[in-house]
Amino acid sequence: MATPAIEFRDVSLRYRLLAERGIVTLKEWVIRRLTTGMTYQELSALADVSFAVESGRTLGIIGHNGAGKSTLLRIAGGILAPTAGEAIIRGRIAPIIELGLGFEGELSGRENIFFNGALLGRSRNEMQERFDEIVDFSELGEFIEQPIRTYSTGMVARLAFAIATTVDAHILLLDEVLSVGDEQFRRKSKERIDSFRRAGVTILVVSHDLDAVEKMCDDAMWLEHGVIRRSGLAKEVVKAYRTSMDPGQAEPGVGGTVRLAGP
C-alpha cells in the first residue's frame, strides 16, 4: 500500500481552560494566582483520532459546529500541535484554513500577496511569477493597490483563495471556502479544486455543504464531539449524517480507529 499523504495516529487535543469566573483584569488574575490559586478544567477538542488519506484522494470532514473539524484541519496545517499522538503530513501544503489569516490590513493587496506568500514558504520570485494570475483569478483588478482594510470580506476571501491555490502544492487544506463569494466565483473555485483533483493533489476539506462534499470528495469522515462517528465513501457517510438529523431514523454510531484509503 502506498504511503499516505496525510496520517493521524491517535491524535488528541485538549485545551486547558480557566474555570474561575469574574476575573476581568491582569491584576485580579495575579492576585488570585498568588493567593487562593487557580482552578482549571480541560476541554477535549479531539480524542484519539486516527485516519490516513492516500495521495490524490479527497476527504471531506463533516459534523456539527464544535465537533472538532477545524481543529483537525489546523493540526494538519501545523497551526496547532496535538496534545497527544502524531500528525504526519507528507508534501507541500496550500492551506486555506481561515480566509484572511496572515494578511496585514495596512498593506495593499499587492503587498499582501508577497507577504502571505512568504508565510506559506514561497519565494518572492515565485510570487512575482504568479502575481498576474493571482490578481486575475481574485477579480480584484484596480483594487489590488488599495489597503486590505478597505476590502470587503468577499474580496479578502477571493484574494486568500487565489494566493493559496495558484502556487504549486501536494496537499490542499480547505475550511468552509466552498460558499465564498458570489455564484460565479464559487463556480470558479470549484473548477479550480476539480483541477487539483485531476492533477492528483490530496485534498482535506471541512464543509457544511453536504451536497458539495458528496460531489467533490472521494471519502468523508463524520466527527462528533472530537471523535470519529463514521467514515467511508462520501455518499454513504453523508447519507448517514443526514439520517442522524432525524432522531427517529438515526443510525448507531461507529467509532474507533479508521483508515481511509482508495482502491
Image: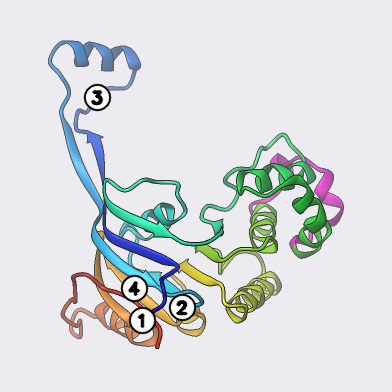
Query: In the image, which disc is placed on residue 213?
Result: 2
At mark 1, the secondary structure is: helix
Magenta stretch prevailing secondary structure: helix
Crowd rating for badge 1 (residues with CA inside 10 Å; few <14, some 14–19, many 20+)? many
Q: Nearer the viewer, mark 3 or mark 1?
A: 1
Residue identified by numbered label 3:
22
Residue identified by numbered label 1:
238
At mark 3, the secondary structure is: loop
Which numbered disc, 4 or 3, marks the residue that appears first in the sequence?
A: 3
Residue identified by numbered label 4:
221
Name the residue type under label 2. Val
Question: Are the residues at dot 4 and dot 1 in contact (C-beta closer than 8 Å)?
Answer: no
| Distance in Å between CA atoms under marks 2 and 4 | 10 Å
| Distance in Å between CA atoms under marks 1 and 2 | 8 Å
Which quadrant: the C terminus?
bottom left
- Outermost residue toward the left? 36
| Distance in Å between CA atoms under marks 4 and 3 | 39 Å
x, y (%) of residue 184? Answer: 71, 74
| Distance in Å between CA atoms under marks 4 and 1 | 9 Å
x, y (%) of residue 2? Answer: 41, 77
Q: Toward the viewer: 119 or 105?
A: 119
Question: Are the residues at dot 1 and dot 2 in contact (C-beta closer than 8 Å)?
Answer: yes
Name the residue type under label 1. Val
Please say if 128 is above or below 61: above
- Residue at left offset 62%, top offset 78%: 199
Does residue 66 appear to the left or right of 250 in the view shown? right
